[in-house]
Amino acid sequence: MKKTITLLVCLFAGLAVQAQSDFPLQFIDQDGQVIPDGTWLDITDYEEDEFFGDILMPVKVWVKNVSGSAVYGGASYTIQNISNGWFQTCFPSVCMRQNAKGSYATQTDNFIPGVPRDIQTEWMPDREGVCFVTYQLKTFRKMGTNYMPDGDGPMITLNFYYGDVTGISGKSASSKPVSSVTYYDLSGQITERPRHGVFIKRTTYTDGTTDVRKKILY
């Protein structure tokens, strides 16, 4: 089992690096490390807006142009589940706010090589609940005054949990009952449920199927 999980980790990491090496825009963390394509981020920290008293659950992610030339970029995002409140993203510059499931697109801006830009994204809950969003980077070609899609980049999944929501699964698209959940560190060793860092989560369902995902928990 340990060898199998280790091989899966290596395979996922290898595929992520290969896919990312061809795309100019990358998600990075606060230490400047690339966040692999397909990563799930569990977000539980929140803060109160000092002016309006709103609850904010910010995403601590930046976007960096790792190529040698400027590119036009933006993102698309899909809200898979939102219990209440608003999901807001001000990336790359103009703020957009949504409170319903659906697929949306940000506006487009110019990205200078090597300069990180805050993703400026958060969930603003009204009460306890969850919000699950997939967020994908995109590049564009400027044709006159229009921007034409040029490429799809890495994707991350943002799982927001506010309040006592124990037992609500980040796999919101699945209603299958869970049999067990096992956590592994990056060496393939079984570990207790992590409070932070990068780890592997293996979910086993009662029908015998499994789901293995690499995650980052803030």
Image (cartoon, helix red, strand yellow):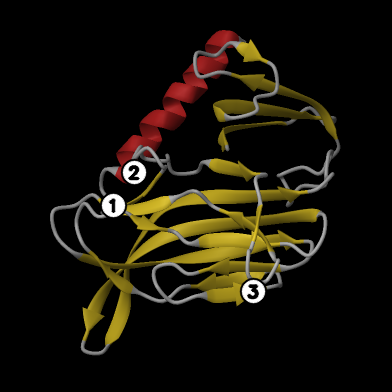
Of marks 2 and 3, which one's residue comes earlier in the chain?
2
Q: Nearer the viewer, mark 3 or mark 1?
A: 3
Vertical placement of residue 44 versus 97, above or below: above
The reply to whether discs 3 and 1 touch (Cβ–Cβ < 8 Å) is: no
Q: Residue at x 19, y 56 (%)?
A: 113
Determine which residue is flagged by label 1: 23
What type is the residue that disc 1 sits on?
Phe
Q: To which quarter of the image does residue 141 belong?
A: bottom left
Marks 1/2: CA–CA distance: 7 Å
Q: Is residue 17 above or below residue 182?
A: below
Q: With 59 as the anchor, is 130 left or right in this view?
A: right
Q: Which amino acid lies under the numbered mark 3 shown in the image of this protein? A: Gln
Q: Using the image, tell me which numbered label, if any, was put on residue 19.
A: 2
Where is residue 41 drawn, in percent x and y?
57, 43
**Mark 3 lies on residue:** 98
Q: Residues within 10 Å of mark 3 (few under 14, many from 20)?
A: some
Q: Residue at x 54, y 76 (%)?
A: 96
